[in-house]
Amino acid sequence: MKEFVAYLGALDDLSLLIEHRMLMWRDIYPDLSKSLEDHRNLTQNWIQEKLLEKKLIPLMVKTLSGEVAGSGCILIQEDQPRPDMNKLEYPYLLSMYTLPEYRKMGVASLIVTEAIKWSKDNGYDRISLHASNQGRTLYENLGFKQTNEMRLKLV
């Protein structure tokens, strides 16, 4: 079985983070593959801005031989004050992507475990995410619980 190592990414990983986010959306919404390319520049600008603001923390996983196997990101989001919170920000896990040849080998679990550790080490009391159908079991196995957030699409 392959061994992997997790590490915090940096601005140098920008092109890889963009590519992984685009591939993630393609996997989730295959019918939108063509229109996704229209969002590449917007995605690049957004990721770069958040990295420079230190509001996006890339989590990378590579093989022992140095091949990147997957990535994810923590976005530090602002929240409103609530009695059950200790900060007005919280980590939100997003852009989870594992290259197909490394799937079902623990890469995504390693990314999520590192995200949880980073969040605890930085004094946060929770971490949130939106689970795709493919990822739901992984997150549930790591202790995530579904919440009751609702959404109304306006357009």
Image (cartoon, grey):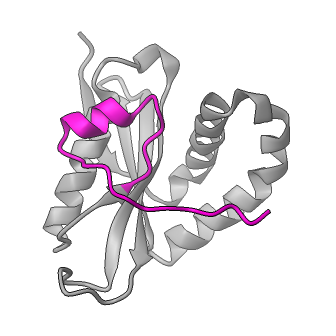
Q: Is residue 114 left or right of residue 15?
A: left
Residue at the (43%, 74%) spot, across then down: 77
**Is-magenta flag for residue 130?**
yes
The x, y position of residue 110, in whole percent, is 26, 36
The x, y position of residue 153, in whole percent, is 69, 61
Residue at the (38%, 29%) spot, across then down: 66
Q: Is residue 120 left or right of residue 145?
A: left
* 61 shown above or below 53: above
Quarter that holds the C terminus: bottom right
* Viewer-nearest residue: 64 or 137: 137
Q: Which span is picked out in magenta?
A: 129-155
* 44 shown above or below 91: above
The x, y position of residue 97, in whole percent, is 48, 36
* 125 shown above or below 142: below
State the predominant SS element of the stretch in magenta: loop
* 83 shown above or below 154: below
**Is-magenta flag for residue 22?**
no
Quarter that holds the N terminus: top left
* Viewer-nearest residue: 105 or 133: 133
* Viewer-nearest residue: 39 or 44: 39
The x, y position of residue 105, in whole percent, is 30, 18
Residue at the (32%, 72%) spot, across then down: 90
Residue at the (70%, 65%) spot, across then down: 45
